[in-house]
Amino acid sequence: MRGGSRLSSLLKPLERLSPVGKILMLRRVLENTTDGQKMWSEFRNSLGPDPALGARCHRINIPFGPGTHLGALDDVARMGAMKAEALAVLAGSSRHVAREAQEEVVGLVEGVARQLVASLFYFQTTGVEEIPGGGSLCRGLLRCRLSRGSREGARAMLRAAPVFRVCEDGGAVEEQTTTLPALEWDEVGLSAPAVFRVWRRPAEVSIGVSFDGMKCWDDISGFPRAVGDVGDGVATLLEPAEMP
């Protein structure tokens, strides 16, 4: 009874609406819950002005050009044709959508795929030490987080010779970029020792990976990160950078 009383109190404001008002309100609710683009825009705006986070959030809208008929949400008979057209756009073979639009969608999908692959790698820091001549030396292991059941896929990915680079945000100073030398991967442990120099402390660094001959770079998991100050001669670990 208590639950029914609560529901009645929630519905009481609706009693003042006319039948037309109730229909319009229900229509507005339906539109708000089925308008994916609107919900995406609200979510994206909620992230605020954060370029690093925004670059990791994606919505891909498949364009449907002239000559294609979009079915309603409950038009089951149209779903097969719509799926076929969407796959054609992703394959760049649609006859209804301009080639430039198809290439843009394919580029977005490839970008998401690169980010997902890059997120399989992370850097495990073993220490940071000051070195003569200025700067600090960061030592650690680059690791691939794939499970044992995916070892063969991981080995194939490593044989594709991924290239890693470290970028240090210099603030007012010019950004420092260092490409890590050829890494010796342990294909059993899926790890490789890596050492890189950081010129400023504290400094924000990022590690990116490229699989296409250093044309496109994507940050690996856990970056950007900040290198803190050394206290009492004790090496500090890399800590996650604070989000602005």
Image (spheres, rainbow, N blue to C red):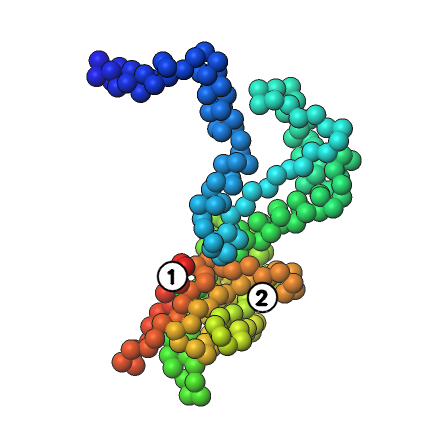
Q: Give the residue type at disc 2.
A: Val
Return the disc, 1 or 2, that comes first in the chain's sequence: 2
Q: Which mark is residue 163?
A: 2
Q: At x 22% / y 13%, what residue is drawn?
A: 1
Above or below residue 178? Residue 55 is above
Q: Nearer the viewer, residue 114 or 174?
A: 174
Q: At x 70% / y 25%, what residue is drawn?
A: 69
Q: Residue furthest bottom?
A: 133
User: Which of the 4 quarters of the picture holds residue 96?
Assistant: top right
Q: Residue furthest right?
A: 95
Query: Is residue 13 something that shows in the picture?
Result: yes
Q: Give the residue type at disc 1.
A: Glu
Q: Taking 221 as reference, is 104 left or right?
A: right
Mark 1 — residue? 242
Residue 14 at x, y percent in the picture: 37, 17
Q: At x 58% / y 56%, what residue is drawn?
A: 156
